Amino acid sequence: MTAVGMELEVAGSDKMRAFNEEALIHVDALFGVALRLTKNERDAEDLVQDTLLKAFTHFGKYKRGTNCKAWLFKIQTNTFINRYRKKSREKVFLVDDRDHRPLQDRAVAPKRNILEDGAEDEGDWYQKIFSDDVKSALEEIPTDFRMVVLLADLYDFSYKETAEIVGCPIGTVMSRLYRGRRLLAAKLVDHAVNSGYIKHDPRVDIEDENGDVQKVVEFKRRRRKRSG
Amino acid sequence: MDCNEFNFLVHAYVDDELDERERVETEVHLGACDTCRSKARRVSRFRQALRESYEPETAPDSLKVRLVAALEAQSHVEAQQAEAASASGPAPVVPLDTMREATRRPSTGTNRWLLAGGGLAAAAAVALLVTAVFSSGASEDASPTIAPSGTARAERPQSRNMGYEPIVRESVSWHRRQVPIEITGPDDARVNHWFQGKVDFKVKTPRFDRRGDGDVNLLGARLSNVREKQAAYVVYEVDGSKVSVLIFDRNEKVPDSAARAGERGFYNAGGYNVAVVEEQGVTYSITSDLSREDHVQLVNAAFRPK
């Protein structure tokens, strides 16, 4: 438990005690992720409460001593997708470059992303990013990517756990993480440029969609061949 | 491995998620390729900067209080269901009276702050039980269709009432939702006072008990919103059915004649009866599980045209 947080403890039955020890200790992490998903405190609180009540009701199905944190996050993710996301009818962009320049200008622009294709001397901009920048940048990227970056990068889940929580194959986690980080980096660079942290606009562009998909397909094929 | 393959693997490599063979292949390539080495370094530093800058939130204490109370209430319900099941066979149904009793029973827990924060905890217990008792209503997926109820059409010209449709829709959506309560009843003066400074109009919870018969109980209230305006959301239990009221200031000019007449419209949306009433510049939207006759009677008793 953190120093500021109130201790969570439910008196009563054995089930309560077990739930205390294994599930309620994750309430801060659940809330942190819920807040990034719902983007507001009230919905985040409702989501966490729904999640933990569901978990409590189905606690009998949970195998004691296994990965309770991942189990809780799976419940929370499903609850979010089923209720909140449907409700908000959020648009999901596969490629969210939000590049409004005319097509011919985009075609000749250099296709690179600061994260992977930047010059070495541009590498210092992210030493100056702040928590709030990351949070707002995260909330600007599409939910599928946001979820994977949150779980794998910020809440310490492995690719395998993330895949189970989100309910997709590991290959999909990898491609979403790859794209999610690039989108996030692009947003953070935008912010750094706008705030004057870095002097020149490195002109960030997302790589050609087909190129990326081709790479992922190729990678999956190679993986299959190896494991087969 | 070539640079193209590495480009996709770089993230998994940095995350230490490659299998042994992939890792070795990657490192062989990195040993020979400056471009990819600097790419891996950038991804790694970015990931590190992300983790180091990110300050994770902690769940607010109010949520924790609510959670514990809700879980204790749920546990209590489960215990009673188990008891009922062993006594009278399958399909236990917890009667309303028992549930109500459960919310009023002081906590027998030993938790120090739960005792200290009794009011809030009790509020949360009520919220949960309100949910449990009333959740057997219309299914969540049924999309509400709104139609003015028969007599309302006859009584009132439709032109103004049609403007109520978004309000009716939102009222039903709030009515269906299982939301926690922030202030408990049954003392309406205490509930009204609680909203002071929280919303910028004076909240006066409707007095459904003016109806004179039957069982009316103010369960609790919370902050909410209607059409992006702040609102008070109040939940009642009337003859064992849920009645919810959204109270808000529309900040729109209501024609004097309408205001004097205590303008009201009755609707049916998604299986719920909804009434919208204007009184002294404040809009009340009353939604219930009651029959139409009971609903109209209840509303007319609480809002008497001047």
Image (cartoon, rainbow, N blue to C red):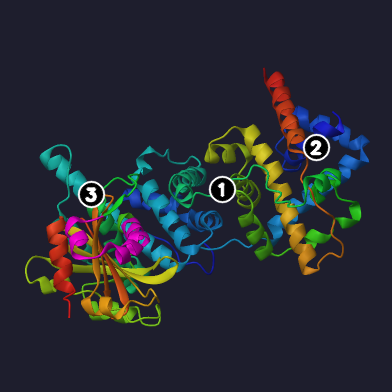
Examine the image and state in which quarter residue A12 appears.
Answer: bottom left
Check residue B167 for magenta coloring.
yes
The amino acid at mark 3 is Ala
Circle 2 marks a residue in which chain? B
Disc 1: which residue: A91
Image vertical order of residue B236 relative to residue A207, above or below: below
Image vertical order of residue A53 relative to residue B115, above or below: above
The amino acid at mark 1 is Lys
Circle 1 marks a residue in which chain? A
Check disc 3 and report its element: helix, strand or loop. Answer: helix
Disc 2: which residue: B7
Kindly report which numbered mark, 3 or 1, lies closer to the viewer in this rendering. 1
Q: Earlier in the sequence, mark 2 or mark 3?
A: 2
The amino acid at mark 2 is Asn
**x and y percentages locating residue B205 in the rendered image:** 25, 75
Q: Are marks 2 and 3 on the same chain?
A: yes
**x and y percentages locating residue A45 in the rendered image:** 44, 60
Disc 3: which residue: B79
Residue occupying the far left of the picture: B213
Which mark is drawn over residue B47? none
Mark-to-mark CA distance, 2 and 1: 29 Å
Q: Please state the extent of the stretch shown in magenta in the rendering.
A: B148-174
One can see residue B105 in this view: no
Name the side, left or right, on which B24 lies relative to B147.
right
Mark-to-mark CA distance, 3 and 1: 43 Å
Kindly report which numbered mark, 2 or 1, lies closer to the viewer in this rendering. 1
Examine the image and state in which quarter residue B130 appears.
Answer: bottom left
Q: Residue at x 42, y 50 (%)?
A: A51
One can see residue A71 in this view: yes
Name the side, left or right, on which B10 lies relative to B195.
right
